[in-house]
Image (cartoon, rainbow, N blue to C red):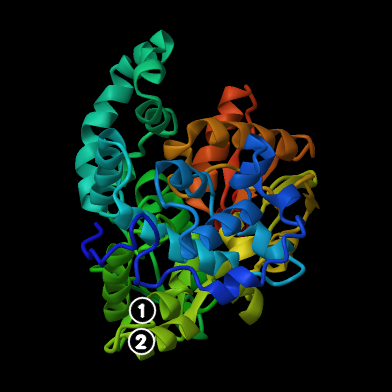
Amino acid sequence: MQTSNPAKNSGGFDAQNPPDPKLIDSCVHCGFCLSTCPSYRVIGKEMDSPRGRIYLMDGINEGEIPLNPATIQHFDSCLGCLACVTTCPSGVQYDQLIAATRPQVERQDARSLPQKLLRQFIFSVFPYPNRMRALLRPLGIYQKSGLQKIVRSMGFLSAIAPQLSAMEAILPDIPAKAFTDTIPALIPAQGEKRYRVGMLLGCVQRLFNPEVNDATVRVLTANGCEVLVPQTQGCCGALSHHQGQEEQAKHFARQMIDTFANTEVDAVLVNASGCGHTLKEYGHILQDDPNYAEPAKAFVKKVKDVQEFLAEVGLTAKLSPLQAQPLTLVYQDACHMLHGQKISVQPRQLLRKIPGVQLREPIDAALCCGSAGIYNILQPEVANELGQQKVENLTNTGASVIASANIGCYVQISRHLKLQGKAVPVLHPMQLLDYSIRGIQL
């Protein structure tokens, strides 16, 4: 949780890294960002667009606009999807501006008590897998006892506690493997060893979709990689970083760097786009840390998304068709993969290597699904609208399988598929490659 409390500028930004006026001034207010901003498309208000938020940042910097609950709500409505960064013809670094603003908002301490308690709960539990596991045990009973169906059918939860209801609504079925980490510390390469790589397990993914990590290990080892999985690894800090929990994000970043120090790996691989984007931001997150600024830069050079890595080094394992007939796939671009890491071609290249795969492209492919870390908990109405749109766009392609490389997107899309009564499986590209390598038919 946020611990520092710099002197405040009378209702404005404090002196600790406020949004850079030079970056603010680079915005020429052309409006190109409006059509690609998911919050603006749903809410329709100028202040809920990147251009509007930059206007607010400038006014707060100049002391003309207060940083108060009225302005904070417009910063909170931002999903942090970074689509505006991709779109902007002037190269405005909105990602750096919103990253500087969120810690300011957290230090302002202007939210209601229920909001504070909810956020405190999230940041005290979600980044800690063992704490999450303790919570999952009663939730598993809640699901299997039939109580969940009763609560959902009555509908009272959404009326009295919308955000708690949103949290309950996105809860997927809890797999049995959620309660233990089964991947060993070192997995040898199959055949000749080409690379030695480290792998991140993630916090939420290892609990709610552990099959992805298992599949990733099998794909890597089948392609000549020795895989190191440090057993002491914790959270990467993505959730904290994206929500302005600055000190917690720095703490997790330092821990992660220490975890992979002296492991002599060729690359540190990650299979969830939100985590990958944050790992690549460690140089910025720790830039003012005298002990970790340089180690952070060195660490970032080794970080790669697993699809980025495999597309670069090439596949050596033989791939088999996933079914007798051609398989139509649609790949869903996660925001922090597409806009944050600029990775789009590589996942498609890998999927096309599977014999018989036919890739289809959805309309509005770059529009956020509404997950955005914990956005679908904190801003459920906007998130639901975006989730509905995303599922419609994906399923309108006629594809029989959706490929998605981010755990948040997986949870959000799976939920809205169920709400729309559509039985389309959502699989990580590593799962599809794993099935192809092992000759498993869908």
Towards the viewer: 333 or 46: 46
Q: Secondary structure at mark 1?
A: loop
Instruction: Evaluate whether residue 193 shows in this view.
Output: no
Viewport quadrant of the N terminus: bottom left
- The reply to whether the C-beta atoms of the residues labelled 2 and 1 are less than 8 Å apart is yes
Q: Earlier in the sequence, mark 2 or mark 1?
A: 1
x then y, percent, for residue 132: 25, 45
Instruction: Evaluate whether residue 232 shows in this view.
Output: yes
Residue indicated by mark 1: 286
x then y, percent, for residue 15: 35, 71
* Label 1 CA crowd tier, 10 Å (few <14, some 14–19, many 20+): many
Q: Secondary structure at mark 2?
A: helix
At 28% from the left and 30% from the top, the residue drawn is: 140
In the rendered structure, the answer to whether residue 412 lies left or right of residue 299 reads: right
Residue indicated by mark 2: 293
Count the numbered circles shown. 2
Q: Against 416, is 303 above or below? A: below
Residue 298 shows which numbered tag?
A: none
Towards the viewer: 404 or 226: 404
CA gap, disc 2 and disc 1: 5 Å
At 78% from the left and 53% from the top, the residue drawn is: 356
Q: Residue furthest front?
A: 64
Q: Against 5, is 37 above or below? A: above
**Quadrant of the rendered structure where residue 81 is?**
bottom right
Amino acid at the residue labelled 2: Ala
x then y, percent, for residue 177: 32, 45
Amino acid at the residue labelled 1: Leu
Towards the viewer: 118 or 89: 89
